[in-house]
Image: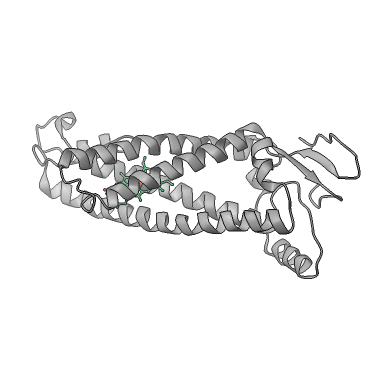
Amino acid sequence: MSLSNEDNSNQGQTYQVWDKPIRVFHWLNLLLVLSLIFVGLIMLFKREIGITSLEAKIGLKELHVVIGYIFAANLFIRILWGFLGDRFAKFSSNMPKIAEIKKYKAALRKGDNPQYLGHNPVGKLAVVIIMLTLVIIMLTGLIRAGTDIYYPPFGGVITEFIAADGVDAASIKPYDETGVDKAKLAEVKPYKSIAGTVHLYLVYFLLLLIVLHVVGVILAELKHQPGIISAMFSGKKRLEGTPLDK
Ligand code: HEM
């Protein structure tokens, strides 16, 4: 267990909580999500900002997808770490429980200030919702990348499927129907469309989650849990009193 108490002064104790993989994932994820939102917004408003050529439109999608791969790899490693990492990284110790959330809220209402080494019960709920949203955004993004611009991991299967008889699938280009069996392309369209719609609406939902997350963390830092923001940089939390999850 990664609890290393460094100091027993009356200002509390310092505990090692977030390990390096967790911190690297968190800040890299933030950077990648912001970059994906930025490129995604340019894609959404391309006409308004004067981007009209097909090459530029495809180029933007390719850029978004390449950043998306790094985002997906980072998320994949975090998911693995959720099974292999230490206690604070493990999903099994971060599952939200309604009874704990109710108890935590009641304690706050009573004026108590329960302290936690890991996430507090509301934080656990937030993390699960954010992670699930990111996973579905990643999956729908990969499906859209395969069905729209024929990028891996699904693009190869799609071009094989839509290639007309006798046409080499590798010769098929996005937004170009040369060599394409139109009936088969029409069969792919509903999947492409559903993936695109879910992707976009979950991104709107993610924007809301990001605002709630940032506001929630700042309020917790100011009101009950000073040091939680710096802990995501240093990995260490300084707590007064005994944490409930020690
Ligand atoms: C949190 C991560 C992500 C965010 C915030 C995000 C954001 C966006 C936004 C705002 C759009 C514009 C919507 C539209 O044009 O309909 C978009 C489209 C798209 N995204 Fe993502 N995305 C993310 C992850 C990914 C990933 C991991 C991939 C695949 C590797 C991906 C692939 C695509 C594709 C192919 C489109 C083009 C849809 C189209 O216009 O045809 N995205 N994304």
User: Residue 20: x percent and y percent?
Assistant: 64, 32
Residue 137 coordinates in the image, percent (x, y) = 41, 49
Residue sitting at 39 percent across and 43 percent down?
36
Q: How is the image coloured?
A: one colour
Q: Position of residue 234 (x, y in %)?
A: 68, 36
Q: Quadrant of residue 201?
A: bottom left
In-front residue for pair 52/161: 52
- 164 vs 134: above or below: above
Query: Where is the N terminus found, in terms of image quarters?
Result: top right
The residue lying toward the viewer, choosing from 1 and 40, is 40
- Residue placed at 45% from the left, 44% from the top? 33
Q: From this viewpoint, is residue 127 visible?
A: yes
Q: Determine whether, in the image, residue 246 is placed left or right of residue 68.
A: right
96 lies left or right of 4: left
Q: Tell me the quarter of the picture where residue 32 sits.
A: top left
Q: Is 148 drawn above or below residue 98 in the view shown?
A: above
215 above or below 20? Answer: below
What residue lies at 79% left-to-right and 43% top-to-bottom?
A: 238
User: Residue 215: percent from the left, percent from the top?
Assistant: 59, 58
Q: Is residue 38 left or right of residue 243?
A: left
Direction from residue 158 to residue 22 in the image, left or right: right
Can residue 89 be seen by looking at this rendering?
Answer: no
